[in-house]
Image: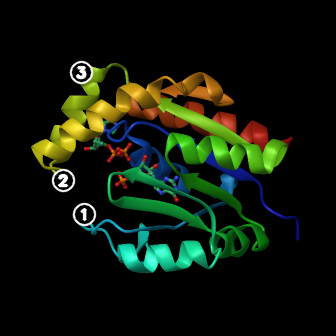
Amino acid sequence: MNKGKIIILSAPSGTGKSTIIAELMKDADLNLGFSISATSRKPRGEERDGREYYFISQEEFKTRVDAGEFVEWEEVYPGTCYGTLASEVKRVTESGKNLIMDIDVKGGINVKSIYGSEALSIFILPPSLEQLETRLRGRGTDSEEKIAERLAKARYELSFADDYDVRVVNDNLAEAVAETKRIIKDFIDK
Ligand code: ADP
Ligand code: 5GP
C-alpha cells in the first residue's frame, strides 16, 4: 500500500479550521486520517481524550519531549504545549491514509521543512480580525482573557500566511470547504 501524504492546516484560533477539517474528513475521496496531537490543555466542550487530542499533563508532556517522542512541539500559549507524536504520523501514513494535521503556524512551517514535497501546507485566513473576534465569542468556549490572548496571537500568526504553499479565506464556509477539497485533491492526485 502507498504511504499517505501529509496535509498541514494552520490558521489563527477561531478562523474555522476545526469546522473545515470536520467537513474534509467526511469526504471519502480524500482518504484522510486526522493526526491526534498531544496537548497539556484541558478538554473544551465536548472534546474527548484520544479523539480531538491526547490530553496529558504538562509533566507528562515534558517527559515525552525528553524521550524524543515528538516530531515537533510548541508552547503555543504560555504554559500550554501542543505536539505531534511520531507514533501518530506512523499510524496514519502507514495505514495508507493521507495525514491531516491541525497545527500552529510555527509547527506547520517546521513540518513542511521536514517533509518537503510529501507535505502540502494550507493557511486558512479569517475574512477580517473583527470576524475572528466574533467567531471566538460565538463559539462560547473561551474566557474573555483567552479570547484576548488568541486575538493578540492572531495578528502575529497572520504575518506567516505567505510562508504556506496555499491560502484559503474562510468567509463563506461551504465555499472555503469546496476550495480546500479541490486543493487537497490536486495534491494527492499528483
Ligand atoms: P478553529 O478550529 O480555527 O479554532 P472553529 O472551527 O472552532 O475554529 O470555529 C470557530 C467558530 O466559528 C465556531 O463557532 C464555528 O462554528 C464558526 N465558524 C466557522 N466557519 C465559519 C464561517 N465561515 N462563517 C461563520 N462562522 C464560522
Ligand atoms: P486549540 O487549543 O484551539 O485546540 O489549539 C490551539 C492551537 O494549537 C491551534 O493553532 C492548533 O493548530 C495548535 N496545535 C494543535 N495541535 C498542535 C500540534 O501538534 N503542534 C503544534 N505545533 N500546534 C498544534
Task: Please give the residue where the numbered disc 3 appears in the rendered image.
Answer: 130
Rendered position, 105 above or below 44: above
The tag earlier along the polypeptide, 1 or 3, is 1
Q: Amino acid at mark 1?
A: Arg
Q: Quadrant of the N terminus?
A: bottom right
Q: Position of residue 169 (x, y in %)?
A: 47, 24
The tag earlier along the polypeptide, 2 or 3, is 3
**Residue at position x 25%, y 68% in the image:** 46
Task: Please give the residue where the numbered disc 1 appears in the rendered image.
Answer: 44
Rendered position, 66 above or below 14: below
Q: Is mark 3 within 8 Å of ligand 1?
A: no
Taking the image as shown, residue 185 lies to the left or right of residue 65, namely right
**Residue at position x 71%, y 53% in the image:** 6
Task: Please give the residue where the numbered disc 2 appears in the rendered image.
Answer: 141
Characterize the local packing of mark 2: few (<14), some (14-19) or many (20 or more) Cα atoms within 10 angstroms: few
- In this rendered view, identify the residue nearer to me: 68 or 112: 68
Quadrant for ligand 1 reads top left
Q: Quadrant of the C terminus?
A: top right
Q: Amino acid at mark 3?
A: Glu
Is residue 123 among what the camera can see? yes
* CB within 8 Å, label 1 to label 3: no
> Disc 1 versus disc 3: distance between alpha carbons?
23 Å
